[in-house]
Image (cartoon, rainbow, N blue to C red):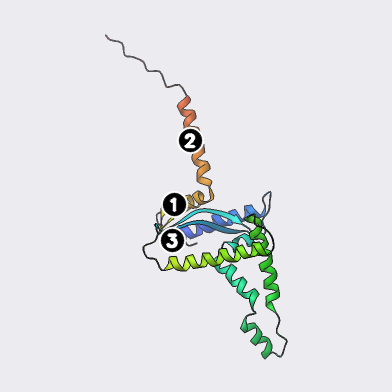
Amino acid sequence: MGLASTDAQKAQAMRFIGSRKRAAETGKQPIADPEIVLDTELDLQKRTFKVVRARVASASEATLASIDSVLELQLEAAAPPLQAVDDAQQAGEPAADPTEAAADRLQALCGTFVSLNSLPAGLAGAAVMQEVYSLGYAVRVAASNIPGWKGTVAGRPLPLPATEDLLAVLGDLFGDAGAAKKKGVKNAAKSKSKSPPKRHKAKAK
Protein backbone atom coordinates (compact mmCIF):
# COMPACT_ATOMS: atom_id res chain seq x y z
CA MET A 1 0.00 0.00 0.00
CA GLY A 2 1.86 3.09 -1.29
CA LEU A 3 0.06 5.52 1.04
CA ALA A 4 1.23 3.75 4.20
CA SER A 5 4.34 4.89 6.05
CA THR A 6 4.50 2.30 8.84
CA ASP A 7 3.89 -1.44 9.13
CA ALA A 8 0.88 -0.77 11.35
CA GLN A 9 -0.64 1.50 8.70
CA LYS A 10 0.00 -1.11 6.00
CA ALA A 11 -1.74 -3.78 8.08
CA GLN A 12 -4.73 -1.49 8.66
CA ALA A 13 -4.92 -0.66 4.95
CA MET A 14 -4.77 -4.31 3.90
CA ARG A 15 -7.58 -5.23 6.29
CA PHE A 16 -9.68 -2.30 5.08
CA ILE A 17 -9.16 -3.15 1.41
CA GLY A 18 -9.72 -6.85 2.04
CA SER A 19 -13.08 -6.12 3.65
CA ARG A 20 -14.07 -3.96 0.66
CA LYS A 21 -13.21 -6.71 -1.80
CA ARG A 22 -15.11 -9.33 0.18
CA ALA A 23 -18.14 -7.05 0.35
CA ALA A 24 -17.99 -6.59 -3.43
CA GLU A 25 -17.84 -10.34 -4.01
CA THR A 26 -20.94 -11.00 -1.90
CA GLY A 27 -22.99 -7.85 -2.60
CA LYS A 28 -26.27 -7.48 -4.47
CA GLN A 29 -24.30 -7.22 -7.71
CA PRO A 30 -21.30 -9.50 -7.04
CA ILE A 31 -17.99 -8.66 -8.69
CA ALA A 32 -15.68 -11.58 -9.46
CA ASP A 33 -12.00 -10.96 -8.63
CA PRO A 34 -12.58 -7.32 -7.60
CA GLU A 35 -9.76 -4.81 -7.64
CA ILE A 36 -9.27 -1.37 -6.12
CA VAL A 37 -9.03 1.51 -8.60
CA LEU A 38 -7.90 5.04 -7.74
CA ASP A 39 -9.42 7.99 -9.62
CA THR A 40 -6.94 10.80 -10.10
CA GLU A 41 -6.83 14.35 -11.42
CA LEU A 42 -3.76 15.77 -13.16
CA ASP A 43 -3.15 19.47 -13.80
CA LEU A 44 -0.05 20.09 -15.93
CA GLN A 45 -0.24 23.87 -15.62
CA LYS A 46 -0.49 23.87 -11.82
CA ARG A 47 1.76 20.80 -11.51
CA THR A 48 -0.64 19.07 -9.17
CA PHE A 49 -1.60 15.41 -8.92
CA LYS A 50 -4.64 14.49 -6.86
CA VAL A 51 -5.94 11.11 -5.75
CA VAL A 52 -9.60 11.99 -5.34
CA ARG A 53 -11.52 8.72 -5.09
CA ALA A 54 -11.15 4.97 -4.61
CA ARG A 55 -13.61 2.36 -5.81
CA VAL A 56 -14.00 -1.36 -6.21
CA ALA A 57 -13.97 -2.45 -9.85
CA SER A 58 -13.96 -5.58 -11.96
CA ALA A 59 -10.71 -6.99 -13.34
CA SER A 60 -11.48 -5.50 -16.76
CA GLU A 61 -12.13 -2.03 -15.34
CA ALA A 62 -8.95 -2.26 -13.27
CA THR A 63 -6.98 -3.11 -16.43
CA LEU A 64 -8.50 -0.13 -18.21
CA ALA A 65 -7.29 2.08 -15.34
CA SER A 66 -3.68 1.08 -16.10
CA ILE A 67 -2.07 2.62 -19.18
CA ASP A 68 0.79 0.10 -19.04
CA SER A 69 -1.54 -2.91 -18.90
CA VAL A 70 -3.55 -1.78 -21.92
CA LEU A 71 -0.50 -0.89 -24.03
CA GLU A 72 1.23 -4.17 -23.16
CA LEU A 73 -1.87 -6.11 -24.21
CA GLN A 74 -2.01 -4.19 -27.48
CA LEU A 75 1.64 -5.05 -28.18
CA GLU A 76 1.06 -8.68 -27.24
CA ALA A 77 -1.89 -8.87 -29.60
CA ALA A 78 0.17 -7.36 -32.41
CA ALA A 79 3.13 -9.77 -32.23
CA PRO A 80 4.03 -12.89 -30.23
CA PRO A 81 6.80 -12.51 -27.63
CA LEU A 82 10.15 -13.58 -29.11
CA GLN A 83 10.98 -15.63 -26.03
CA ALA A 84 7.92 -17.83 -26.49
CA VAL A 85 8.87 -18.48 -30.13
CA ASP A 86 12.50 -19.28 -29.22
CA ASP A 87 11.45 -21.68 -26.46
CA ALA A 88 9.11 -23.53 -28.82
CA GLN A 89 11.75 -23.78 -31.56
CA GLN A 90 14.38 -25.10 -29.15
CA ALA A 91 11.95 -27.77 -27.98
CA GLY A 92 11.29 -28.79 -31.56
CA GLU A 93 7.64 -27.85 -31.29
CA PRO A 94 5.55 -25.55 -33.47
CA ALA A 95 5.43 -22.08 -31.98
CA ALA A 96 2.04 -21.30 -30.51
CA ASP A 97 0.46 -18.06 -31.58
CA PRO A 98 -0.18 -16.06 -28.38
CA THR A 99 -1.56 -13.20 -30.42
CA GLU A 100 -4.87 -15.00 -30.81
CA ALA A 101 -5.56 -15.17 -27.06
CA ALA A 102 -4.26 -11.63 -26.57
CA ALA A 103 -6.47 -10.38 -29.37
CA ASP A 104 -9.49 -11.98 -27.75
CA ARG A 105 -8.67 -10.33 -24.41
CA LEU A 106 -8.11 -6.99 -26.12
CA GLN A 107 -11.42 -7.26 -27.95
CA ALA A 108 -13.26 -8.01 -24.71
CA LEU A 109 -11.46 -5.12 -23.01
CA CYS A 110 -12.39 -2.80 -25.86
CA GLY A 111 -16.01 -3.85 -25.42
CA THR A 112 -15.84 -2.86 -21.75
CA PHE A 113 -14.22 0.48 -22.64
CA VAL A 114 -16.87 1.23 -25.27
CA SER A 115 -19.70 0.30 -22.89
CA LEU A 116 -18.38 2.38 -19.98
CA ASN A 117 -17.90 5.45 -22.16
CA SER A 118 -21.05 5.09 -24.31
CA LEU A 119 -19.05 4.90 -27.53
CA PRO A 120 -20.00 3.25 -30.84
CA ALA A 121 -19.06 -0.40 -31.10
CA GLY A 122 -16.67 -1.78 -33.68
CA LEU A 123 -13.66 -0.11 -35.23
CA ALA A 124 -14.77 3.41 -34.26
CA GLY A 125 -14.73 2.58 -30.55
CA ALA A 126 -11.43 0.72 -30.89
CA ALA A 127 -9.87 3.74 -32.60
CA VAL A 128 -10.99 6.03 -29.77
CA MET A 129 -9.54 3.62 -27.21
CA GLN A 130 -6.20 3.51 -29.06
CA GLU A 131 -6.08 7.32 -29.21
CA VAL A 132 -6.97 7.74 -25.52
CA TYR A 133 -4.24 5.44 -24.24
CA SER A 134 -1.61 6.75 -26.65
CA LEU A 135 -2.39 10.29 -25.50
CA GLY A 136 -2.38 9.18 -21.86
CA TYR A 137 1.06 7.65 -22.28
CA ALA A 138 2.37 10.82 -23.96
CA VAL A 139 1.01 12.99 -21.13
CA ARG A 140 2.63 10.74 -18.53
CA VAL A 141 6.00 10.97 -20.28
CA ALA A 142 5.72 14.75 -20.49
CA ALA A 143 4.68 14.99 -16.83
CA SER A 144 7.64 12.88 -15.71
CA ASN A 145 9.99 15.52 -17.16
CA ILE A 146 8.36 18.43 -15.35
CA PRO A 147 9.84 19.20 -11.90
CA GLY A 148 8.06 20.60 -8.85
CA TRP A 149 4.99 18.36 -8.68
CA LYS A 150 2.76 18.48 -5.61
CA GLY A 151 0.46 15.59 -4.81
CA THR A 152 -2.52 15.16 -2.53
CA VAL A 153 -4.69 12.25 -1.49
CA ALA A 154 -8.21 12.96 -0.26
CA GLY A 155 -7.14 16.59 0.22
CA ARG A 156 -4.07 15.74 2.30
CA PRO A 157 -0.57 16.61 1.04
CA LEU A 158 1.75 13.79 0.01
CA PRO A 159 3.75 12.11 1.36
CA LEU A 160 1.51 11.26 4.30
CA PRO A 161 3.23 11.47 7.70
CA ALA A 162 3.51 8.37 9.87
CA THR A 163 1.08 9.97 12.32
CA GLU A 164 -1.70 10.31 9.71
CA ASP A 165 -4.88 8.34 10.39
CA LEU A 166 -4.75 6.13 7.31
CA LEU A 167 -8.19 4.64 7.93
CA ALA A 168 -9.66 8.15 7.83
CA VAL A 169 -7.87 8.78 4.52
CA LEU A 170 -9.22 5.55 3.04
CA GLY A 171 -12.67 6.36 4.39
CA ASP A 172 -12.59 9.72 2.61
CA LEU A 173 -11.45 8.10 -0.65
CA PHE A 174 -14.26 5.55 -0.54
CA GLY A 175 -16.82 8.15 0.53
CA ASP A 176 -17.34 6.77 4.03
CA ALA A 177 -16.36 9.98 5.81
CA GLY A 178 -18.91 11.98 3.82
CA ALA A 179 -21.74 9.90 5.22
CA ALA A 180 -20.32 10.21 8.72
CA LYS A 181 -20.07 13.98 8.38
CA LYS A 182 -23.66 14.24 7.16
CA LYS A 183 -24.78 12.15 10.11
CA GLY A 184 -22.84 14.43 12.43
CA VAL A 185 -24.41 17.53 10.89
CA LYS A 186 -27.86 15.98 11.21
CA ASN A 187 -27.31 15.18 14.87
CA ALA A 188 -25.98 18.67 15.47
CA ALA A 189 -29.08 20.16 13.85
CA LYS A 190 -31.29 18.08 16.12
CA SER A 191 -29.43 19.25 19.19
CA LYS A 192 -29.81 22.88 18.07
CA SER A 193 -33.54 22.45 17.57
CA LYS A 194 -34.04 21.58 21.21
CA SER A 195 -35.22 24.38 23.48
CA PRO A 196 -32.37 25.94 25.47
CA PRO A 197 -32.48 25.34 29.22
CA LYS A 198 -34.29 27.98 31.23
CA ARG A 199 -32.17 30.31 33.26
CA HIS A 200 -33.28 31.22 36.78
CA LYS A 201 -32.73 34.81 37.71
CA ALA A 202 -31.31 35.38 41.11
CA LYS A 203 -33.69 37.29 43.39
CA ALA A 204 -32.42 40.53 44.82
CA LYS A 205 -32.30 40.47 48.61
Q: Earlier in the sequence, mark 2 or mark 1?
A: 1
SS label for mark 2: helix
Question: Which residue corresponds to mark 3?
Answer: 6
Q: Dot 1: few (<14), some (14–19), or many (≥20) neighbours within 10 Å?
A: few
Q: Position of residue 1 (x, y in %)?
A: 50, 62
What numbered label is drawn on residue 165?
A: 1
Q: Which residues are magenta?
A: 198-202
User: Real-space Cα distance between discs 2 and 1?
Assistant: 22 Å
The amino acid pointed to by label 3 is Thr
Q: Quadrant of residue 77?
A: bottom right
SS label for mark 1: loop
Question: Which residue corresponds to mark 2?
Answer: 185
The amino acid pointed to by label 2 is Val
Q: Is residue 31 left or right of residue 157?
A: right
Q: Position of residue 32 (x, y in %)?
A: 67, 59
Q: Position of residue 168 (x, y in %)?
A: 47, 49
Q: Earlier in the sequence, mark 3 or mark 2?
A: 3
Residue at the spot 49% in from the left edge and 67% down from the top edge:
138
